[in-house]
Image (cartoon, helix red, strand yellow):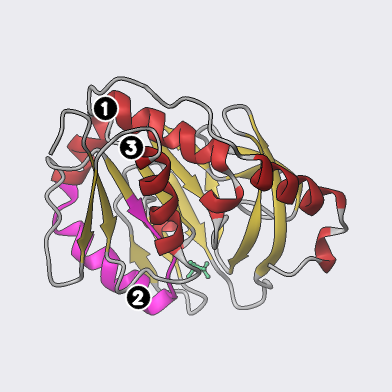
Amino acid sequence: MSRKALCIAHLFPDLLNLYADRGNIAVLKHRLAWRGYDVDIVRVTHGETPDFSRYHLVLLGGGSDREQALVAEKLRGCRQAFRSAVEDGLPVLAICGGYQLLGEYYQLPTGEKVPGLHLVDMVTEATPDAPRLIGNIAVWSEEAGVIVGFENHGGRTRHNHRPLGRVLHGHGNDGLSGHEGLRHLNIWGTYIHGPLLPKNPALADAVLRDALAYAHLPDDLEPLDDALEREARAAFVALRMEEVAP
Ligand code: GLN
């Protein structure tokens, strides 16, 4: 591989595969390739153990409660390696179920607690009487401007870290705080799933900048023609979002 190669790990795509996380990987890959970088995408499936010393960026996608519990168990087995890589600055993009896993625990609606990785001080609780938080969402992020997407989660997440952004429309972490997602070290946590990065190219580039810095590679992310994405996002924000299909 050339000097400019970046290694991106997609953790457990066979389990955490709700809502098109492969599309997010494709965006990362192509936005790098269009700028002349070589990219190595490593799919780590459930039977395998991740090697955190190899990766410059890790993506953890969304999943159902059952799959989430399986992944939590697997990742707890290599928590120390994951934790020290994250403390050294390994960027992590964690979406919905993957985001919840980074906290201390995820409490299921049954009351059972699935222990998380405790990479961040954060807890998530779902109760049987509280409705799921579903719908289109827009947030304002200092690092990536307006981020739009779709959320669907039963868990309510609480933490005292910096959020990814402020909720403009939708629910976010718990439907009350006005905060969405989490930023800590180079962790990007969010409830926005589905085509998060296709809809939000500025966010994709912000995450890639962290990965390039972590890999000690030059930042040659010159602007791309994102006119289509900008147009789509503007239309999305302008419409009454309840009426827009996810
Ligand atoms: N199981 C989690 C919840 O419902 C996350 C679901 C998801 O990833 N969409 O809160």
Instruction: Please give the residue where the numbered disc 1 appears in the rendered image.
Output: 214
Q: Is residue 163 magenta?
A: no
Report helix, strand or loop for mark 1: helix
Instruction: Assign a secondary structure to mark 3.
Output: loop
Quarter containing the N terminus: top left
Question: Closer to the camera: disc 1 or disc 2?
Answer: 1
Numbered disc 2: secondary structure: helix
- Find disc 2 in the rendering and name its residue: 67
In this rendering, would 224 be left or right of 184? right
Tell me: 23 left or right of 69. right
**What is the CA distance from the residue labelled 3 to the residue labelled 2?**
23 Å
Give the image quarter of residue 71.
bottom left
Q: Residue at x 39, y 68 (%)?
A: 113
CB under 8 Å between discs 3 and 2: no
Q: Quadrant of residue 186?
A: top left
Q: Residue at the spot x=67%, y=47% of the render?
A: 228
